[in-house]
Amino acid sequence: GMMNNLWGNSRYPNATKIGAWQDPDMLIVGMNISDTPQGVNMVEEWRAHFSMWCMLAAPLWIGVPLPADPAAMDIFLHKEVISVNQDPLGLMATRVSSSDDGHATVWAKKLASPAGAASAAVALFNTA
């Protein structure tokens, strides 16, 4: 599933560059809203999924017919997150830290920036 694809792709950060993108699979954003188990916030999972695919510089293959669920459309159209995916450097985020139990990970991605200033996107990904 999604988690296996994320962990699998994260092992090869140098394989992603301009013109060579890893493909961890299509986005699940917008899927299974009617089958969501009690207590699971599917919209939050969709946000996390979309954000991590943007951090990976992965192709953003939408896996549902458009227009989709309104919450999914808000995620698909989030300009700031998409700008991380579309950054001109084309670099993939790397895992820089993990909690002792492995449920929380911190990811960083170097971004292009004006006038040589350092710029990065940082994501905290919680699987618990």
Image: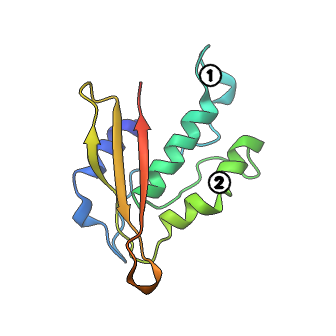
Q: Earlier in the sequence, mark 2 or mark 1?
A: 1
Q: Residue at the location (23% across, 65% down)?
A: 14
The residue identified by callout 1 is 36
Give residue 66's position: percent from left, percent from top.
73, 52
Q: Residue at the location (50% across, 43% down)?
A: 49
Q: Quadrant of residue 76?
A: bottom right
Residue 26 shows in the view: no
Seen in the picture, residue 118 relative to 28 is either above or below; the reply is below
Q: Residue at the location (72% across, 50% down)?
A: 73
Give me the C-alpha separation between circle 2 and circle 1: 20 Å
Q: Residue at the location (69% across, 25% down)?
A: 34
Helix, strand, or loop for circle 2? helix
Quarter holding the C terminus is top left
Q: Quadrant of residue 29?
A: top right
Amino acid tagged 2 = Phe
The residue identified by callout 2 is 76
